[in-house]
Image: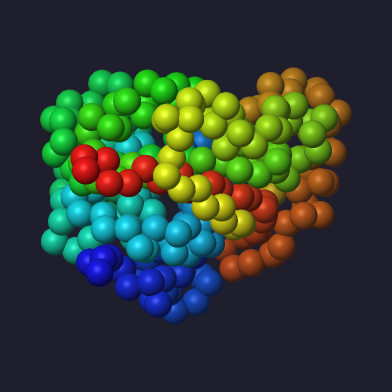
Amino acid sequence: MRAQSTYGFDNLWHDGCHRPASAAAFESIETHDPHAIDPLVLYATGIGASDYVSRIFPLLSALTIGDLLDVGAGGGQLGATVRERDRRWTCIEPSTAMRTRLSRLGPSLVLPHGWEDADVAPETHDTVLAANIAAPLTAPKRFLETCRRWATRNIVWVVPAQNGPRGLCLAGCLPAEWHGEDETPGIDIVLAQLSPEEAPASIAVADWTFSLIATDVPGLASYLADRLSWTSTDARRSELVEHLTRRARPVRGGFRLDVPRKSAVLVWRDLKK
């Protein structure tokens, strides 16, 4: 039987942490100054207000995790839930802002590097977890080889599976002619680059909703327009404010935007048998 996770699943809320007394416990992101928004912080804040962890965790609950290496750990919500009590949780995370957030969850060790530069000894972790990072899509063969070198039992990748955008955060709120992204499901991109011998032992899919609470809509719209490289005089800027205002729901702390998402969980298991 699998060891108990750090957080009992029955007590999980959307972010995988203990259930708050009210929805007001969800963190909102300050958007009054769009130039001060860190895209990684925006994403991590949204994950914290989403049902992502509660949808993904059940797909991993049967695995014996053991010592966990969390690659591109981000805000740590999934890793903190998947990890087993009294076992090591090592995080690889290059972002200073994300390392600050991780420190609140008490990982055993945080390596301030990307996966290509991280100094991790071979076969020192039972499970390698890589959730929502670029490597499985951009360098799946090389990344899988690296994960195999690190893991003794399991490799777990969580990759986008929705038929829609997967790059700009909140692109799923926008018309395709605005975001201009390739809408091929990420899972299709990953599997197309792996040989049959490299294919995972299992693939499971979960629907979830990315939810972001922002302090104001105009600031968030300005941030998104800048990320889309729209000029300051682009008429679409005012259209974007109106578009997001129609989609946003007032909540305590600001306005909430919801984007339907889907993730595929790829598992390689029993690696050293």
Above or below residue 165? Residue 180 is above
Above or below residue 26? Residue 166 is above
Colour setting: rainbow
Residue 3, picture quadrant: bottom left
User: At 35% from the left edge and 33% from the top edge, which residue is drawn?
Assistant: 95
Q: Quadrant of the N terminus?
A: bottom left
Total numbered labels placed on residues in the image = 0
Residue 233, picture quadrant: top right
Q: Quadrant of the C terminus?
A: top left
* 236 relative to 182 in the view: left or right: right
Whether residue 245 is visible to the viewer of this picture, yes or no, is: yes
* 198 relative to 67 in the view: left or right: right
Q: Position of residue 120 (x, y in %)?
A: 17, 30
User: Which of 161 and 224 lies nearest the eye of the viewer?
Assistant: 161
Q: Position of residue 259 (x, y in %)?
A: 67, 51
Whether residue 213 is visible to the viewer of this picture, yes or no, is: no
Q: Position of residue 29 (x, y in %)?
A: 52, 50
User: At 44% from the left edge and 64% from the top edge, which residue is drawn?
Assistant: 58
